[in-house]
Amino acid sequence: MKIIAMITARSTSSRFPRKHLAILDGSPMISHIIENIKCLRGIDDIVLATTTNPEDDDLAHEARLQGIAYIRGSENDLVERHGRVLLDFNPDAVLDISGDCPFMDVGAVQAVIDSVELHPFYDSYGMSGPYARVPEMLAGVKSASWYLKAFEIYAKHTEFCSADQYWLATIKEPNCMSAYTVDGSAFLNKTVTPMKMSIDWRLELNFWNIVIEHLGYYPTSADDFNKAFKELGDKPFIWSENNGS
């Protein structure tokens, strides 16, 4: 079974332009995502899905520096970009990661990847937790069948959402996808999961740089954040030009 990791990113965010290249713990945010993926077993290729905009030349350059593949397509047509990844790499399943989610519980994501090998023929794979919405530290796996079904559903409901958010159209046919859910009780608890852990604003980047500086290492599990939050407690944050510059 061929499993690839696909990172979706572009530099033209209105809230935080070029956020994927913003400095987190001394390195571009996207480089941490790539390093996390490289820690996982069973991933055959890592692919950046970005756009043909000149603004994303630096993202493509970072992909080359990190030794991963990339494809470039229309900024507003994620169906095209994701479709090209499927055509070019022909995976059985895809670890789907947003480029603004730099934190990963590596053990938990590994458990989801392992479930693909152990329980094939589902459209999607995820993890249950103590909350209805799992945090951005977890990345789901989608079989190639999920994408083909989602593309087909979107083609029938283009008025419902844009091609840049084609997956929303699956709401129109909620029973068409089969899903396998991994028990997340060994990885998640009620201490950290309610937090938003993606980075959409520079303020969030500053906050996470302070957390990482306190830890003294880059976090790779929910327990790392539990530790930091307990130790920081009610201590005041001191902002400086060095945080997230």
Image: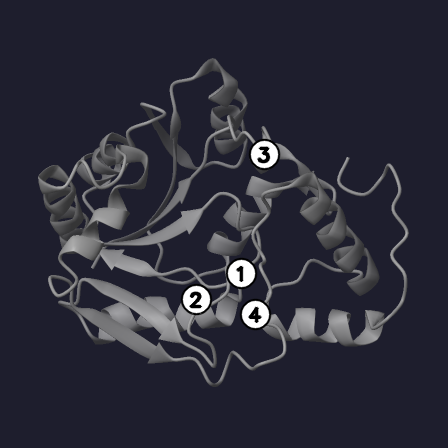
| Residue at the image position 13 percent from the left and 54 percent from the top | 145
Q: Do the residues under discs 3 and 2 have CB atoms within 8 angstroms?
A: no
The answer to which of marks 3 and 2 sits earlier in the sequence is 3
Q: Do the residues under discs 4 and 1 have CB atoms within 8 angstroms?
A: no
Residue indicated by mark 1 = 104
Residue indicated by mark 4 = 194
| Crowd band around label 2 with a 10 angstrom C-alpha radius: few (<14), some (14–19), many (20+) | many
Residue at mark 4 to residue at mark 1: CA–CA distance: 15 Å
Residue 23 visible in image: yes
Asked where in the image residue 86 lies, by quadrant, the reply is top left
**Image-based side of 212 in relation to 95, left or right:** right
Residue at mark 3 to residue at mark 4: CA–CA distance: 22 Å
Q: Do the residues under discs 1 and 2 have CB atoms within 8 angstroms?
A: yes
Residue at mark 1 to residue at mark 2: CA–CA distance: 7 Å
The answer to which of marks 2 and 4 sits earlier in the sequence is 2
Q: Do the residues under discs 2 and 4 have CB atoms within 8 angstroms?
A: no
